[in-house]
């Protein structure tokens, strides 16, 4: 407990006045003549005891009233929060922390949440004592520093803008605590302007924040909630593309979700692709062309999956976006952008034992069905060759090579395949009955390519062994993600397969069998990758089959073969779609690298960027603005015209809020105060600086004591 006016405590010395008055004014005994003297003495003694008790009680009440009055005038306060208690106008070291994530653009009552925070902050800045030190921090990454003066702090607050790559508030708050710890001012205060969204306060950051705050135990913490208790918004989830590099003969598939928060009814989502605009005056200008539309009904809190398909895309780079039709509270999550590159059909070499066309029929039909080949719609162009032709075969024109049930190959052939993969290509090896003798496949040349050493042939004649993919996040299996639990692998049993000994360094299992044994194993080699499948995709028609993968209801095998081959040819190897703040690495053709490239941002701003000649890449770090970016060099005929897209991370626009109870658990034992209006802020700050004043309670106690004293005095001294 502390006192605002400690000198007034001397007034408690006036407690001697009732004592003096009591001694001076006490009643003197009177001599009473009465015949029955004995009874008079008894009555006299009784009256004396009663008078003493009454006088003592009144004396204590009067003394208590004076003591309480002196305490009230001294204005005692209780310390209920961090920070020293003292004068309201003493200078403070204040850190004003702002959440500037895109989520703060949510508009309510014709104001964004950031505008509401700025208004409160400017009012608060005017309330700070003179000579205070003020630092203004936001969600951008970087060191914190005190502003030159309050005028500079005001200017900084007025110029605050949202940032697409906002860091969590606990990280900013920890930086604020570090800054305040170095201030020489005794009183330190932190003000956090936030919408209390869960995404801004990740629970895994709570422990570290509590440690940093406990290093500055004297700093007062004030949370100022500028959010909306019941937000209403529609949002698009992240876009999932069937491939970032696709064949001109394939259909681009775009999946996303429409998410509702507090909004129902029917809503429309549109797909646009940017196409050349022949009517534009600027060469190379593009205009959005609608290529799809879906209308769905939602209830508040519901989400619906959406899928768009785009076909007949010409070769080259294509960009577009998916958007929600209409307006809602937060526009930052109403549009998602995408970029894809369309290339000619990938050439695949299928090398198989003779008769090679018989061995290769299942895989070739899965990758390039005859009807698709005739109509020119097959995204893979498959060439079939006998294994014996591999030594003379030029592999450079092919994006990937498949070895079907290979027999022992010459060391030079294995070395040729290893070099081919290391250059950035793909290789798939389907092991079968021809992998004998085993030692030839376990020697160094073959082991430079295969995923591990062959141990033995294993059998499951009862047909209980099947493929059992588990992690469907791998690009070769992601197409099964929406079908998990619905893929009839049990109808395609595996009767024989190769057991592997120890896997090669860097190799990992893409898909196991249902007995946990490795079925499909990937091994990275240089810039490429090789996949080993421990059971074949084809077999000698005159022998018992090793599996029934391509037989009967074979759509799981068709999907697996296509996705695995798309992965090997590099359909998803180059990243063209990024999150805001990430560094873009755009691959460039090694044979024609320009001295510089023109980067055009979503807002039309342009900048020249020099390439990394050694890595054949263009590194771009200025990706804070969501949208489609374009990279150009040279003329329209032989020049470069590529691009990439940048989107907000989903957590940057999530509006779900913490409750007050959850927030208390987040901060643990560290005291904080929560306010939602100017009045609450003023009360919290006054309480934090001065403490909880007891003046009102003490004055009420003085009045109660004086009232009781008056009642008792009238009763004790009334004339009877």
Image: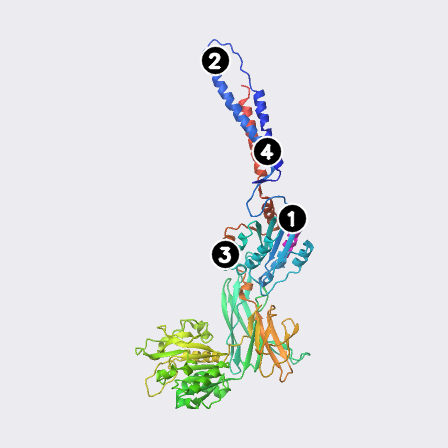
Q: Is residue 670 above or below residue 283?
A: above
Label 1 vs 4, first from the N-terminus: 4
Mark 4 lies on residue: 69
* Residue 129 shows in the view: yes
Q: CA distance from mark 1 to mark 4?
A: 31 Å
Which circle marks residue 40 in the picture?
2
Residue 337 position in % (x across, y down): 57, 72
Q: Residue furthest front?
A: 444
- Which of labels 3 and 4 is toward the front? 3
Give the magenta-colored segment's residue range. Answer: 118-125
Tag 3: Cα neighbours inside 10 Å, few (<14), some, or many (≥20)? Answer: few
What residue appears at the point 49 percent right and 78 percent down from the top-left corner? 526
At mark 3, the secondary structure is helix
Mark 3 lies on residue: 207
Label 2 vs 4, first from the N-terminus: 2
Position of residue 688 in the picture relative to residue 454 (left or right): right
Tag 4: Cα neighbours inside 10 Å, few (<14), some, or many (≥20)? Answer: many
At mark 4, the secondary structure is helix
Q: Is residue 42 above or below residue 482?
A: above
């Amino acid at each position: 407990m502390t006192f605002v006016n400690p000198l007034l405590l001397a007034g408690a010395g006036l407690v001697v006045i009732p004592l003096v008055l009591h001694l001076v004014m006490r009643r003197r005994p009177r001599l009473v003549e009465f015949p029955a003297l004995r009874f008079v003495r008894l009555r006299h003694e009784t009256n004396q005891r009663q008078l003493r008790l009454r006088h003592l009680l009144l004396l204590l009440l009067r003394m208590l009233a004076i003591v309480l009055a002196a305490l009230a005038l001294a204005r005692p306060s209780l310390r209920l929060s961090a920070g020293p208690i003292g004068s309201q106008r003493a200078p403070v070291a204040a850190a004003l922390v702002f959440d500037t994530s895109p989520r703060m653009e949510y508009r309510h009552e014709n104001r964004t949440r950031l505008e509401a925070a700025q208004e409160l902050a400017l009012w608060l800045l005017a309330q700070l004592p003179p000579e205070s030190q003020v630092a203004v921090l936001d969600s951008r990454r970087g060191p914190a520093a005190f502003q030159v003066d309050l005028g500079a702090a005001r200017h900084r607050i007025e110029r605050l803008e949202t940032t697409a790559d906002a860091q969590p508030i606990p990280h900013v708050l920890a930086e604020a605590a570090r800054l305040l710890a170095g201030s020489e001012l005794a009183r330190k205060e932190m003000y956090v302007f936030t919408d209390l969204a869960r995404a801004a306060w990740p629970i895994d950051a709570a422990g570290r924040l509590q440690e940093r705050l406990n290093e500055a135990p004297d700093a007062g913490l004030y949370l100022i909630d500028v959010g909306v208790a019941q937000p209403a918004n529609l949002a698009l989830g992240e876009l999932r593309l069937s491939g970032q590099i696709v064949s001109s003969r394939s259909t681009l598939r775009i999946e996303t979700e429409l998410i509702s928060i507090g909004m129902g009814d029917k809503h429309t989502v549109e797909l646009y692709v940017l196409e050349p605009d022949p009517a534009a005056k600027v060469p190379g200008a593009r205009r959005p062309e609608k290529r799809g539309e879906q209308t769905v009904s939602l209830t508040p809190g519901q989400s619906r999956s959406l899928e768009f398909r785009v076909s007949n895309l010409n070769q080259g780079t294509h960009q577009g976006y998916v958007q929600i039709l209409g307006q809602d509270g937060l526009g930052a999550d109403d549009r998602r952008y995408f970029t894809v590159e369309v290339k000619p059909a990938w050439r695949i070499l299928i090398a198989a034992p003779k008769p090679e066309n018989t061995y290769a029929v299942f895989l070739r039909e899965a990758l390039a069905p005859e009807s698709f080949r005739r109509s020119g719609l097959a995204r893979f162009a498959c060439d079939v060759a006998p294994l014996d032709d591999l030594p003379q075969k030029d592999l450079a024109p092919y994006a990937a090579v498949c070895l079907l049930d290979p027999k022992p190959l010459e060391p030079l052939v294995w070395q040729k395949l290893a070099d081919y993969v290391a250059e950035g290509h793909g290789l798939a090896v389907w092991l079968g009955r021809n992998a004998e003798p085993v030692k030839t496949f376990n020697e160094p040349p073959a082991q430079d390519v295969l995923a591990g050493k062959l141990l033995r042939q294993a059998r499951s004649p009862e047909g209980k062994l099947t493929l059992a993919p588990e992690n469907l996040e791998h690009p070769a299996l992601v197409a099964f993600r929406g079908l998990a639990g619905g893929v009839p692998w049990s109808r395609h049993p595996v009767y024989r397969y190769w057991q592997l000994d120890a896997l090669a360094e860097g190799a990992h299992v893409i898909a196991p069998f249902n007995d946990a044994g490795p079925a499909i194993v990937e091994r990275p080699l240089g810039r490429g990758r090789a996949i080993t499948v421990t059971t074949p995709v084809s077999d000698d028609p005159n022998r018992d089959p090793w599996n029934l993968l391509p037989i009967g209801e074979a759509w799981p095998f068709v999907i697996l073969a296509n996705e695995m081959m798309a992965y090997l040819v590099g359909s998803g190897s180059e990243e063209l779609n990024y999150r805001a703040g990430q560094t873009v690495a755009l691959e460039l053709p090694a044979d024609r690298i320009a001295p510089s490239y023109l980067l055009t941002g979503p807002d039309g701003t342009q900048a020249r960027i020099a390439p990394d000649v050694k890595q054949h890449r263009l590194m771009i770090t200025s990706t804070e603005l969501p949208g489609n970016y374009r990279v150009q060099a040279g003329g329209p005929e032989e020049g470069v015209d590529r691009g990439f897209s940048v989107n907000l991370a989903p957590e940057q626009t999530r509006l779900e809020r913490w409750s007050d109870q959850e927030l208390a658990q987040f901060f643990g034992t560290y005291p904080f105060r929560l306010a939602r209006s100017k009045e609450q802020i003023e009360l919290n700050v006054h309480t934090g600086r001065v403490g909880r004043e007891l003046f009102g309670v003490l004055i009420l106690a003085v009045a109660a004591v004086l009232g009781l004293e008056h009642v008792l005095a009238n009763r004790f001294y009334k004339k009877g």
